[in-house]
Amino acid sequence: AVTYSDIGDVHRLMGDYERALAFHQKALNIQENVKCNPLECATTYMNLGETYREMKDYTTALTYYQK
């Protein structure tokens, strides 16, 4: 899950937000199906929030930041 999240972050930094979201969502799906480390889950939520913020979808970004 951490690797998917890292790959998503690279795509976000390159401006490929759709691919970034796909990889972050894969990470989140894995983390939700196993008992994940709270720090890893928080990092994935933060990465999703950052991606949505950069897409100027502030409402969705805030939702992920608050998780």
Image (cartoon, rainbow, N blue to C red):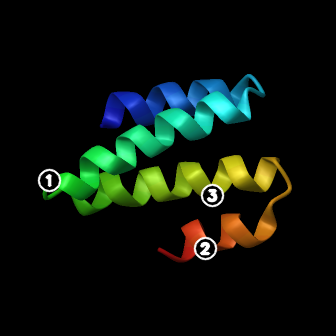
Is disc 3 in contact with disc 1, using a CB cutoff of under 8 Å? no
- Quickly name the residue at label 1: 34
Q: Secondary structure at mark 2?
A: helix
Eye-nearest disc, 3 or 1: 1
* Distance Cα–Cα, label 1 vs label 2: 22 Å
Is disc 2 in contact with disc 3, using a CB cutoff of under 8 Å? yes
- At 37% from the left and 41% from the top, the residue drawn is 27
Judged left or right of residue 31, residue 63 is right
Q: Secondary structure at mark 3?
A: helix
Q: Position of residue 47 (x, y in %)?
A: 55, 48
Tell me the crowding category of disc 1: few under 14, some 14 to 19, or many 20 or more residues within 10 angstroms, Cα based: few
Residue type highlighted by circle 2: Thr
Residue type highlighted by circle 1: Val
- At 76% from the left and 56% from the top, the residue drawn is 53
Sequence-first disc among 3 and 1: 1
* Distance Cα–Cα, label 2 vs label 3: 8 Å
- At 80% from the left and 48% from the top, the residue drawn is 54
Tell me the crowding category of disc 3: few under 14, some 14 to 19, or many 20 or more residues within 10 angstroms, Cα based: many
Residue occupying the far left of the picture: 35
Tell me the crowding category of disc 2: few under 14, some 14 to 19, or many 20 or more residues within 10 angstroms, Cα based: few
